[in-house]
Amino acid sequence: MSPDASHGEAGANAQWGGRFSAGPAAVMAEINASIGFDRRLWRQDIRGSLAHAAMLARIGVLSAEDAAAIAGGLAAIGEEIAAGRFDFSTDLEDIHMNIEARLTARIGEAGRRLHTARSRNDQVATDFRLWVRDAIDGLDGQTVALMRALATRAAEHAADPMPGFTHLQTAQPVTFGHHLLAYVEMLARDRGRLADCRRRMNECPLGSAALAGTSFPIDRAMTAAALGFDRPTANSLDAVSDRDFALEFLSAGAIAAMHLSRLAEEIVIWCSAPYGFIRLSDAYTTGSSIMPQKRNPDAAELVRAKTGRITGALVGLLTVMKGLPLAYAKDMQEDKQPVFDAADAWALSLAAMEGMVRDLVPDTARMRAQAGAGFATATDLADWLVRAGLPFRDAHHVTGRLVAAAERRGVDLAGLSLDEMRAVEPRITADVYSVLTVEASVASR
Ligand code: ARG
């Protein structure tokens, strides 16, 4: 960093280097710096500093002129960063000190007053909460968009039969719409987890300072309200060392990614040639460099894989936090990359899934044909036998024998003659054929 003759020895950090006579080793600077990734917090850092400075002015710790200079300087820095004109410095470690140093360079001494009654510990805890809260709001909107896409396709195919599976074996006929709506339910629960996380995390750490609070008569309700928090946090030690909000966000993400990976896997299966249930659009498939006929569902495969990154982020941060004594420790600087990476992967997965769902073209005739294969209406036959007076266990057994007879003859259940059926169970009448079609099976449920 640039030596600052009036505030510390040459080479020592201008923000905290008062008691140091030399700067850090290159490796120390490298391992210590977070600016390479925490620059993503710049908007939140500026928002937090604006709220803090306004509060300091209100309680008379900052003069009105200094507060105005700080607000103007921070706004100008925001424009510099947004325009890509800001020179981020590794020597200044992190986003907080980069912005503060730039503020002082622009407005002079008032910039050096901003950090009164604050520590980077409550500052980063506040910035990161604001970032996660913004991410939650964005992901919630994307989840709604995917739910809408699924519901739209489900409405189009509300009456189109497809085979329902258990154990990936043909089980009973369902409809394509019914199947797609199952994912809408999962996504609704994902939204619930995001909302729950947001509600619990929406408290403002500002005022906790390093760990023990501050002797200045700060107005914590004012900063909390200015930043859209419901209230200030209750315990300063907890507030600077709590990363539950990031962990809850990641666990919600791990579950959501798991849901997306299941739909992705179904898409991969459905668009394979032996299934042929759907065709993905050109926009969401890729070709092979050697096999000209290939249409690979790469987007679905990558959504399926992203769950590994997101779950990995959760396990990684849980491991960072495990066993940390109160209050802040630098370990916690390792909280940001997994959260940023997981949020990016989650957002990209939702966007790719929405595009695939909107574009996919189901082969309804093929799904209909497969819905009737594999004796899929056997349960309907058993239910008919129950209505004819058999106990369900007997009906199940009789149906099993009829399935075996059909299999021997190479026909489906409706392909057995009434005589063949009555040879197995004499109480069967011609009415049984009315429940053996896919349409009757679906309509009955
Ligand atoms: N860059 C730091 C982090 O992300 C900010 C807090 C630093 N606090 C400290 N006491 N050194 O955690």
Image: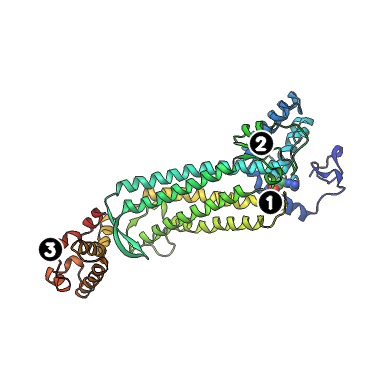
Residue occupied by mark 2:
48
Name the side, left or right, on which 419 lies relative to 74.
left
Position of residue 255 relative to residue 222, above or below, is below
Residue that protrudes farthest toward the top in the picture: 64
Which class describes the residues within 10 Å of circle 1: few (<14), some (14-19), or many (20+)? some
Which of the numbered marks, if any, corresponds to residue 332? Answer: 1
Q: Secondary structure at mark 1?
A: helix
- 14 relative position to 250: left or right: right
Give percent across and percent down for residue 146. 42, 46
Quarter of the image containing the N terminus?
Answer: top right
Compute the Cα span from label 2 to label 1. Answer: 19 Å
Residue 198 sits above or below residue 408 on the image: above
- Residue situated in front as seen by the camera: 339 or 193: 193
In the image, is residue 64 above or below residue 155?
above
Q: Amino acid at mark 1?
A: Met
Foreground label between 1 and 3: 3
Residue 377 quadrant: bottom left
* SS for dot 2: helix
Residue that badge 3 annotates: 430
Q: Earlier in the sequence, mark 1 or mark 3?
A: 1
